[in-house]
Image (tube, rainbow, N blue to C red):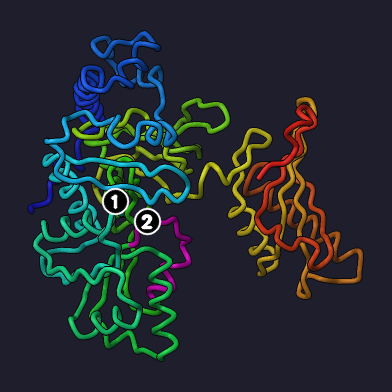
Amino acid sequence: MIRDVHSETMPRAEIEQLQLERLQAMLNRLYSEVSYYRSLLDSVDLPPTELRSLRQLGRLPFTRKETLRENYPYGLFAVPLREIVRIQASSGTTGQPVVTGYTRNDIKHWTELVARAFFAAAVTKEDVVQFGLDYGLFSGGLGFHYGAEDIGATVIPASTFNPQAQLDIMRHYKTTALVCVPTYVLRLLQTAQDQNFPPQELSLRTVVLTGEPWPEGIRDKIAHGFHAEAFDVYGVSEVMGPGISSECEARNGLHISEDHFIAEILDPATDEVLPDGEQGELVLTTITKEAFPLLRFRTGDLTVLDRRPCTCGRTTARMRKVAGRVDNAVFVQGKTILPSQVEQILQSVEGVKPRFQIVVDKSGTAEELRLRVEMDKRMFSDEMRVLTELKRRIERRIEEVLGVVATVLLVEPASLQGEQAKVKVIDRNNPAGTEGR
């Protein structure tokens, strides 16, 4: 495959015109072929033929994961089963599995988008690409595999071999690019460290991570342990799989393939569309999917959009690395707060990761945020002055970084066992529902 530079460097006006045309075609297809969406579109009194601007997208209803489960297995397919060439599904560990289907054209588009992700990570036909991904119903393995073959790279489908076997393959077969989930690359690094494995014995130069959010610190670990660069590739099983967006060499956000997806950011508390630069829930609309098109699908992932052109020359919108999940967030004082953000702040103040609990107390129109922080030996002092200064430092840092006012309570060691990163919401306006996550 030759890189499709035009699709990634179109002027903003051209991108939006293409999106509108494809959205109109997709809505017509949904209305005529999927009874669920036909009823949904009728309920908002916006026939597909009357949608003439992307600004009208906000009038259209959302699709939630619960909807996909309720229509299990084929209720939302927009083509007959005879036109489906592949079926994949989620694990179903949290409920009914979500089944997705692909036409031959869907597979072609998916392959092209994964190839884009490889090009962005400077992986070419000269590379030997090793996959440490599951090749079952999980959409990652096959999606990446097809994309790597499409660019002409040599592919090693090592799948879920144990870490030792993966390292042996990397060394003997001269692997130059590795694709796996973040937690697995950490296992590989630990195995290499335990064996005093010298990274200079490897040909590895690129690691592509997918499937899970991961902190920036992993880049440094990969650079130190494998002498390789790490790139993030984002996907959602229900929408397509990996390749929806990916990092380029600038690594200043993940470029969204806007010729195939329309991205929005919502305030999870109000469902209002947020402007670029504000964090909220990522919502995706597919505009080229044939088998399983989705209208305003709520991913549950928290991120930020940036539509300014990138230094790499691409003009497509970028999304910041996923910060966390909406269902792990708390909404207070008009802000979205994640336990992971609080953990990072506490570590930056004292260099440790103490156990903590976020407490939101709602009474009338007031919302009080309290943070209970368990002290350990490195934080402990019997001088009230020292403890008071520590409390104030944390409070100042919370306000500087998160933009909310919090009251910090330093509590005794071992008093928060099992409470780490737990959120408790006390709603005095609704006594029946006082306990949160």
Q: Look at the image and tell me whether residue 311 can be seen.
A: no
Mark drawn on residue 175? none
Q: Look at the image and tell me whether residue 272 can be seen.
A: yes
Q: Quadrant of the C terminus?
A: top right
Start and end of the magenta stretch? 209-223
Q: Is residue 10 above or below residue 241?
A: above
Q: Where residue 202 sits in the image (x, y, percent)?
A: 26, 83
Q: Which residue is mark 1?
A: 242
What amino acid is at disc 2? Gly
Looking at the image, residue 367 sits to the left or right of residue 95; the answer is: right
Q: Which residue is mark 2?
A: 211
Looking at the image, residue 428 sits to the left or right of residue 335; the answer is: right
Q: Residues within 10 Å of mark 1 (few under 14, many from 20)?
A: many
Q: Where residue 169 sits in the image (x, y, percent)?
A: 23, 81
Residue sitting at 62 percent across and 49 percent down?
Answer: 401
Q: Secondary structure at mark 2?
A: loop
- Seen from the viewer's position, the closer of residues 69 and 333 is 69
Residue sitting at 22 percent across and 33 percent down?
Answer: 11
Residue 216 counted in the magenta span: yes
Residue 4 counted in the magenta span: no
What amino acid is at disc 1? Pro
Residue sitting at 39 percent across and 73 percent down?
Answer: 222
Looking at the image, residue 436 sits to the left or right of residue 137; the answer is: right
The first of marks 1 and 2 along the sequence is 2
Q: CA distance from mark 1 to mark 2?
A: 8 Å
Q: Secondary structure at mark 1?
A: strand
